[in-house]
Image (spheres, rainbow, N blue to C red):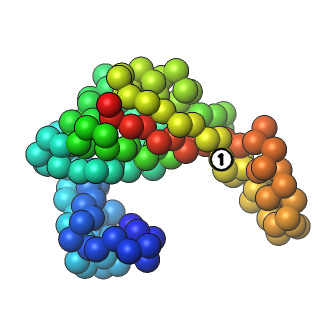
Amino acid sequence: MQEYLIYGASPGQLHGCDLLCERLHAARSLLPNVVLTVADGQYLPYAAGLFDVALQYTVFTSILDDGIKANVAREMLRVIRRGGIILWYDFWLNPINQQTKGIRKAEIRRLFPGCSFKFHRITLAPPLARRLVPLSWILCLMLEKLRILNTHYLVAIRKM
């Protein structure tokens, strides 16, 4: 969230929630003026249509239960206003970590019915990037531009 403050958001406009208290405790030390709440994503403690933008970074791929994923998506849609955007950053492919499950475009569309989508494939596969960065940042940037080895989607999901 610090990045959003750098780009001009005021702390009073930002809200964050996490299921784990220790994560919020760490965040509070960095963001003392931002409202941070312990909450289950299935039951967000906010009024309907309160936000213009909701963000999720690598949350859905950590939820293995399809029903819980659907509930979290429904809550995200509930708390953003009509015309608002959900900014999604999550991977579609991760064959290494069995505690996660990649999410493809079709599933994202099913989770957010009635929305419009702009998909971008980004992020060079992290295991590959970790090996190549010490050798050449330029090579990593070139490979990422090819998109064939990119493992994450950045998606703007607009509530209609």
Q: Name the residue: 23% across, 51% down.
A: 51
Q: Name the residue: 43% across, 30% down.
A: 116
Q: Name the residue: 26% across, 30% down.
A: 74
- Between 118 and 15, which is closer to the camera in this rendering? 118
- Between 120 and 129, which is closer to the camera in this rendering? 120
Indicate whether 122 appears above or below 105.
Answer: below
Q: Quadrant of residue 59?
A: top left
Q: Is residue 134 left or right of residue 5?
A: right
Which image quarter holds the C terminus?
top left
Residue 111 horizontal/vertical position (percent): 38, 25
Q: Which residue is mark 1?
A: 122
**How many marks do you count on the picture?**
1
Numbered disc 1: secondary structure:
strand
Crowding at dot 1, Cα within 10 Å, few <14 / some 14-19 / many 20+, comes out as many
Q: Name the residue: 38% across, 74% down.
A: 8
Indicate whether 44 appears above or below 13.
Answer: above
The amino acid at mark 1 is: Ile
